[in-house]
Each structure stands twice: as structure tokens, then as C-alpha cells.
Image (tube, rainbow, N blue to C red):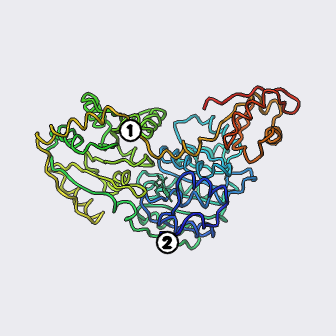
């Protein structure tokens, strides 16, 4: 069964090349079921956990089916959180890198005008949160008339966060003739109803969770409320994970735990909904790139975080909602790796534990708190690890972008520069072809061009003495 390889899939060479660089060789279970159906234009309701490869399950067929030449948004992905929108956009950009698929994330708290400006560029795929997508529809800055693919990701979470009416309002704006895919860890009644109403005879796909949660060891510690801080330190010293997310139920508690750990010398940061969006993204970037090992978080961080194998999840506070347990622990044991999940339970919280155990169909193994002597013995190794930076083994975006340089051209719409002028000029440079040109964005006064295949310096040098439409235009490496 595992012999199936993406190489044998009916996919464009540009997509296969990206999958190869991303090291997606063997499709995961959800991908094996979903990709052929989606390529065939079927509506799908997919019950699948995060960590199972579900993003690529829809991103691969979407990237395959996008008509590059068409200047319209052809696929819309709705996600419940900004973090997930940013993550999905990046995954789509990576898979569509060599096909030059332009994807854009739309979410609140980022200036509307910037997004409006971006939407004027060629945009094939929009990934957004329902609120901001609706704003763009109302302001007529987002044209969805040509959407052929709609994905509702983490539909159960949309419902939980009260977004389902907004989702419905968006669906009503879309062409009826489209493929719809709904992804959800559970399919509550209201989602089922929505699907019946807006999907044409959908195929139901239920991927048992063993792709992800079977690879997680679930344990628990019984602890008094005021002893949790001491226990979290002892447990982390004993476990000494390469990376760890500690979940708390409130922002105040996140702050309290993070400050305490920082004082103890942990490399640590915090994330919750009370932080500015920029700060939230920079914390996530820092965690992903290995700047610190411990992230203390509210449920905000349980969504859409794809960090190179988080080794340990600690529920400092047991989640009040059983679904949340699955989302939190789904941050570990991803893509075939093994993971650890530890939950602290106080004597008054037994009922939450029971509800979680019933829900996941598994009893959490009770552990004894480590002894003083055990902690003392483990401390040296812990200190040593804390002094070393975490090595990120699998930075997919860095790998896919390594041969790509973004160039800044000091001329845009006002100088009447069009994409065809840039392609014509650049592909005339000796040893450079149209294949080496990636995404182009043309602003009023300047333009950006991605140069692929390691040809960036060559283009940069040649442009010193090459004119575009008879005009000399300064070219430099773009800042980002
Ligand atoms: P997701 O469930 O979409 O959040 O994906 C979980 C993780 O699996 C992400 O790190 C993906 O990049 C990775 N992944 C997805 N598909 C594959 C594949 N076919 N082979 C290896 N890793 C994959």
C-alpha cells in the first residue's frame, strides 16, 4: 500500500517538482483518498485530524487545476484563524511555487488597503478568515465570480467560534458551478446541514485518526492547582523536549507561566489573542525557526501551527472543551513523528478528563510526579539543551525558496511596465528563460519579480545594462 508515490500521480511536472523539494514523496491516507476525487471535481466532506496532511490534500489538486493564465481568483479557502490562514497560504505557495501560483491571505487586523492593493495583482488563490473575506466582498474589492474551488477548513471550529453565518453569506456569493470541500475533525449537525444545502451530492470521507493521534503518547498528572507551576518545571526538566507548547486556558495564566519559566532560564515566549497580530506572527516565526524551545499559549496557537515536530505538548490547564484537547495535542506526532502529550488535572477537574477520554476513546495514563532526586539528576542535561539553539530539521519554505531571489525593479504601472515587458526582457538575457521567472507583482512605482533556479544574480547583473521598453530601470534585490 505504501508503494504509491506522488511520481505516479497525474500531476503537472511543476507540482511534482515542488512536492519533491518539500519531501512529500508518499501521499498520506487522507491525500490518497482525497486527491483523485478532488482532481475529478467531486464535492467532499472530509473528516480528518490536523497533522494528517489534510492541507496538501486540497492544496495539491487546487494547485494542479489552477489556470495560470486566468487573471481571477479561482480558489477560496476559508479558515477560522489568522494563523491558520497564513499557514495554509504558505503551504499553497510552496506547492504552487514552480507553477507560479499566487496566493494571498486575507485576515483582520492587517490594514484593509494593503490587501486591497494586493488583490489588484494576479491572485489565483485567496485564503482568508470569514470576517475579512466578507468585508472585501462588501467593499467590492474581492471578485469571486470565477471561483471554481471552495474549501472550508476546520469547519467545526468555524461553528464553535460563531462564524458559520458569515461562511454561509460567503457561499451565497460564489458561483454554483464549483467544487466544494469541507474539512472538519468532527461533523456536527449544523455543518452537516450546511453541507446538504450547498453541496452537490458530496462524497463523505472519514479518515480514522491513527495517522496522527496513534503516534501520540497521552499521559496525565494529578496535581493541586497551586502546585502546577512547580510540577511543570519538574516535568519539563525530566522530559527535556527539543520543543514544547504549554497550553493554558487564559491569557493571564499564559503570562504567569511564561514569566516564571523565563525567570528560571527557559528559552521561552508566549502567544495569545491579546497580542497584536504582528507580534503573534513574529512569536510563531521565532518558535518555528528554533529561536526558543518553549511556547506558552492559549488555544489561539492550537490552530494552524505547523512547527517541525513539536516534541511535547503540556496541558497546564485541562481544556474545557473536549475538541480542544484533540487540536492541542495534534500539534505533536505530526507527519509520521512520535509525540508526547501531558495533561495536568486538579481534583475538581475530573469531569473534563472523563469527557476527553470518552471523546478520544482512550484513557490517559496516570503518572507519578518525579521525585526531587530524579529532577536533580536530570537537571544537567536540561541546562545543556537550554543553552543550545534548537536545530530545525525540516524548514520546507526555506528549502523551496533557496534558489529563488526576489528582485525589485524601480518602475511599475506609472512607467507603463507590464508583466509581459518584464518577462520579455528577462528571458532575453543569455542563459535565462521564461521558466526561470516566478511570480511578478507590479505596483504603481515599482515591481517585484521572483527569479527561480538560482538565476537571480545573473539577472541582476544583466539588468545593469539592459533597458525595459527603452527605459533604464534600477534593479536591486528586494528587502524581503
Ligand atoms: P496538515 O495536516 O496539513 O497540517 O499537515 C501535517 C504535516 O505533514 C505538515 O508538516 C505537512 O507539511 C506534512 N505533510 C503533508 N503531506 C505530506 C506528505 N505526503 N509527506 C510528508 N509530509 C507531509
Looking at the image, which is closer to me, 363 or 452? 452
Q: Which residue is mark 2?
A: 204
Residue 259's spot in the image, x, y percent? 28, 30
92 shown above or below 477: below
- Residue at 20 percent of width and 36 percent of height: 379
Query: Distance from label 1 to label 2 (Cα)?
Result: 41 Å
Relative to 348, 245 lies left or right: right
Density class for disc 1 (Cα within 10 Å; few <14, some 14-19, many ≥20) is: some
Residue 263's spot in the image, x, y percent? 26, 27
Q: Which residue is mark 1?
A: 390
Relative to 330, 22 lies left or right: right
Residue 290's spot in the image, x, y percent? 41, 37
Density class for disc 2 (Cα within 10 Å; few <14, some 14-19, many ≥20) is: few
- Residue at 28 percent of width and 34 percent of height: 384
Looking at the image, which is closer to me, 39 or 437? 437
Residue 421 at least partly seen: no
Amino acid at each position: 500500500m505504501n508503494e504509491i508515490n506522488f511520481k505516479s500521480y497525474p500531476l503537472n511536472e511543476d507540482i511534482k517538482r515542488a512536492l519533491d523539494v518539500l519531501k512529500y514523496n508518499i501521499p498520506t491516507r487522507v491525500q490518497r483518498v482525497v486527491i483523485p476525487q478532488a482532481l475529478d471535481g467531486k464535492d467532499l466532506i472530509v473528516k480528518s485530524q490536523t497533522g494528517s496532511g489534510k492541507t496538501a490534500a486540497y492544496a495539491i489538486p487546487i494547485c494542479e487545476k489552477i489556470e495560470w493564465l486566468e487573471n481571477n481568483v479561482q480558489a477560496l479557502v476559508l479558515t477560522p484563524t489568522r494563523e491558520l490562514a497564513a499557514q495554509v497560504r504558505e503551504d499553497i505557495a510552496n506547492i504552487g511555487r514552480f507553477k507560479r501560483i499566487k496566493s494571498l491571505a486575507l485576515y483582520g487586523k492587517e490594514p484593509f488597503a494593503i490587501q486591497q492593493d494586493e488583490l489588484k495583482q494576479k491572485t489565483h488563490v485567496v485564503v482568508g478568515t470569514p470576517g475579512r473575506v466578507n468585508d472585501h466582498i462588501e467593499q467590492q474589492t474581492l471578485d469571486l465570480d470565477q471561483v471554481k474551488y471552495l474549501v472550508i477548513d476546520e469547519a467545526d471550529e468555524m461553528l464553535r467560534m460563531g462564524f458559520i453565518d458569515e461562511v454561509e453569506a460567503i457561499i451565497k456569493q460564489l458561483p454554483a458551478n464549483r467544487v466544494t470541500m469541507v474539512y472538519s475533525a468532527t461533523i456536527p449537525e449544523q455543518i452537516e446541514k450546511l453541507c446538504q444545502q450547498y453541496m452537490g451530492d458530496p462524497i463523505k470521507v472519514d479518515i480514522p485518526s491513527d495517522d496522527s493521534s496513534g503516534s501520540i503518547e497521552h499521559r496525565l498528572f494529578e496535581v493541586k492547582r497551586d502546585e502546577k507551576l512547580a510540577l511543570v518545571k519538574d516535568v519539563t526538566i525530566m522530559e527535556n523536549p527539543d520543543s514544547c507548547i504549554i497550553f493554558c486556558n487564559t491569557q493571564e495564566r499564559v503570562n504567569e507561566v511564561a514569566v516564571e519559566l523565563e525567570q528560571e532560564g527557559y528559552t521561552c515566549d508566549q502567544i495569545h489573542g491579546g497580542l497584536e497580530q504582528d507580534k503573534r506572527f513574529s512569536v510563531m516565526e521565532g518558535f518555528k525557526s528554533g529561536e526558543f524551545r518553549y511556547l506558552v499559549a492559549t488555544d489561539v496557537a492550537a490552530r494552524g501551527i505547523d512547527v517541525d515536530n513539536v516534541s511535547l505538548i503540556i496541558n497546564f490547564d485541562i481544556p474545557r472543551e473536549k475538541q480542544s484537547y484533540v487540536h492541542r495535542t495534534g500539534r505533536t506526532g505530526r507527519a509520521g513523528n512520535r509525540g508526547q502529550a501531558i495533561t495536568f488535572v486538579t481534583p475538581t477537574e475530573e469531569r473534563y478528563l472523563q469527557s476527553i477520554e470518552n471523546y478520544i476513546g482512550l484513557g490517559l495514563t496516570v503518572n507519578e510526579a518525579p521525585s526531587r532526586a530524579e529532577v536533580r539528576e536530570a537537571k544537567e542535561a536540561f541546562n545543556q539543551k537550554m543553552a543550545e539553539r534548537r536545530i530545525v530539521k525540516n524548514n520546507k519554505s526555506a528549502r523551496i525558496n533557496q534558489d529563488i531571489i526576489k528582485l525589485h525593479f524601480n518602475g511599475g504601472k506609472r512607467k507603463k511596465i507590464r508583466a509581459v515587458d518584464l518577462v520579455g526582457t528577462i528571458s532575453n538575457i543569455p542563459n535565462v528563460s521564461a521558466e526561470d521567472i516566478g511570480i511578478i507583482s507590479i505596483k504603481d512605482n515599482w515591481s517585484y519579480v521572483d527569479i527561480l533556479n538560482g538565476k537571480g544574480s545573473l539577472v541582476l547583473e544583466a539588468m545593469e545594462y539592459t533597458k525595459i521598453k527603452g527605459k533604464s530601470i534600477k534593479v536591486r534585490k528586494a528587502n524581503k
